[in-house]
């Protein structure tokens, strides 16, 4: 299986005319001082600055340790030296490595393509220099998991690629484009559990989602819309023409379609007063029960307003789409719908559409209004970031 996957990748890269590379900051939330690197396939050359200092092949292990802001590099045979930066540059298309932080001791992960280590005063910057599509496949495995349908992977590949290009400069001053945490997009290294992910990424290679004005879209998604997506302006206070409310039957009857909670009426009333709704003290009780037939932006009480997203956050609820009912014993039952902010694509709805044989383009066009699915190469220069590195 592994061999077949490798062959697929080689064919993909041979066919792809312009394989482009992105730099991803690894273990970004950790202060790493020392790592071990294992060559797991293919061949690399080891470079310090522009100088070639050795080769690194399957079975080899390298150790890199931070020393006074520099990288000290050694292997079983001895010490290479101490350098400002060290690069493992892939000489073959099947080159992969496994990286294990030693100080602190963290779980190892496997990566495609190249590695760059840079010394800083207190930590080492660890960068995976990886082909765009291999990175996207890794993100899909981390964010969608290994068991989804092909058309869902394709739809998600477009969103991930669009997000990647839209945020290419996010960590530029740290020497890379995106980090591997949820701050950017979760990336736990190479996709390795389902070859369909790589195939889906390849089949949509280069495709992104642009708005009517040929700008990359804000590729928002969430777990489940609860039956209706939320207008962007209801959450982020900025209207985005392609992020409007959509009636979404595909999200109903899915695992995260519903939730519920029980709270105390007195606590709810105190909360409203505490949030500036003084009239909660004097209006009839039934006016305090929130009812949403469709998603609302505000809860309005006697001229005072409170954002639904604020309420969701304060109470730690799964969504801001819910109804309240009085219950015996001074309680309120809260019946909620969906999971997440509700803007853009609903993952469970998209999954349901994919299982009903909708295509990835149908899925994206269902959740985003007036968008264009196109190759990023065809976008005007003003819509793209600088995709090179110094
Ligand atoms: Zn980030």
Image (cartoon, rainbow, N blue to C red):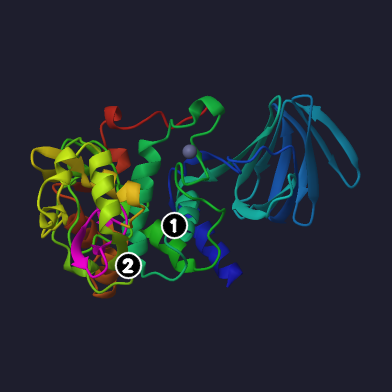
Q: Nearer the viewer, residue 389 or 17?
A: 389
Q: Residue at x 17, y 45 (%)?
A: 281
Residue placed under numbered mark 1 in the picture: 143
For the C terminus, the image quarter is top right
Instruction: Name the front one of labels 2 and 1.
Output: 2
Crowding around mark 1 (Cα neighbors within 10 Å: few <14, some 14 to 19, many 20+) is: some
Q: Nearer the viewer, residue 183 or 72?
A: 183
Residue placed under numbered mark 2 in the picture: 256
Q: Is residue 205 magenta?
A: no
Above or below — where is 368 with respect to 195?
above
Q: Is residue 104 left or right of residue 116?
A: right
Q: Is residue 46 left or right of residue 74?
A: left
Tell me which label, 2 or 1, sits earlier in the chain.
1
- Marks 2/1 in contact by CB < 8 Å: the verdict is no
Crowding around mark 2 (Cα neighbors within 10 Å: few <14, some 14 to 19, many 20+) is: some
Part of the protein shown in magenta: 319-345
Q: Is residue 298 left or right of residue 82?
A: left
x, y (%) of residue 138? Answer: 50, 55
The quarter of the displayed image where residue 140 is located: bottom left
Q: Residue at x 40, y 57 (%)?
A: 201
Above or below — where is 37 with respect to 168?
below
Q: Secondary structure at mark 1?
A: helix
Q: Nearer the viewer, residue 233 or 363?
A: 233
x, y (%) of residue 152? Answer: 33, 64
x, y (%) of residue 33? Answer: 74, 37
Above or below — where is 72 with respect to 266?
above
Q: Secondary structure at mark 2?
A: loop
């Amino acid at each position: 299986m592994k061999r077949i996957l490798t062959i697929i990748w080689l064919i993909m890269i041979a066919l792809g005319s312009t394989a482009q590379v992105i730099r991803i900051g690894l273990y970004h939330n950790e202060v790493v001082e020392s790592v071990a690197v294992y060559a797991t396939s293919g061949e690399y050359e080891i470079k310090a600055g522009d100088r070639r200092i050795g080769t690194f092949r399957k079975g080899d292990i390298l150790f890199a340790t931070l020393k006074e802001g520099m990288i000290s590099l050694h292997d079983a045979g001895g010490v290479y030296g101490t350098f400002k930066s060290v690069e493992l540059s892939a000489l073959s298309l099947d080159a992969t490595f496994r990286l294990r932080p030693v100080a602190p001791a963290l779980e190892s992960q496997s990566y495609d393509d190249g590695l760059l280590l840079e010394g800083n005063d207190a930590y080492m910057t660890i960068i995976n220099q990886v082909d765009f599509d291999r990175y996207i496949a890794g993100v899909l495995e981390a964010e969608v998991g290994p068991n989804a349908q092909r058309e869902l992977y394709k739809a998600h590949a477009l969103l991930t690629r669009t997000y990647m290009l839209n945020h290419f400069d996010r960590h530029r001053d740290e020497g890379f484009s995106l980090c591997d945490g949820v701050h950017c997009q979760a990336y736990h290294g190479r996709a390795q559990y389902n070859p369909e992910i790589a195939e889906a990424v390849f089949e949509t290679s280069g495709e992104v989602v642009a708005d009517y004005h040929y700008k990359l879209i804000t590729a928002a998604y969430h777990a489940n819309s609860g039956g209706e997506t939320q207008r962007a302006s209801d959450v982020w206070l900025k209207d985005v023409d392609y992020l409007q409310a959509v009636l979404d039957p595909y999200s109903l009857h899915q695992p995260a379609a519903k939730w519920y909670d029980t709270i105390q009426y007195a606590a709810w009333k105190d909360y409203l007063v505490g949030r500036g709704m003084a009239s909660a003290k004097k209006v009839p009780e039934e006016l305090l029960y929130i009812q949403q037939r469709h998603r609302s932006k505000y809860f309005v009480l006697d001229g005072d307003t409170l954002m639904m997203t604020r309420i969701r956050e304060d109470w730690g609820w799964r969504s801001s789409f819910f109804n309240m009912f009085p219950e015996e014993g001074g309680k309120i039952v809260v019946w909620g719908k969906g999971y997440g902010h509700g803007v853009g694509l609903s993952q469970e709805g998209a999954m349901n559409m994919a299982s009903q044989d909708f295509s990835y383009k149908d899925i994206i066009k269902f959740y985003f209004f007036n968008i264009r699915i196109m190759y990023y190469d065809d976008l005007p220069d003003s819509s793209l970031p600088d995709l090179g590195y110094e």
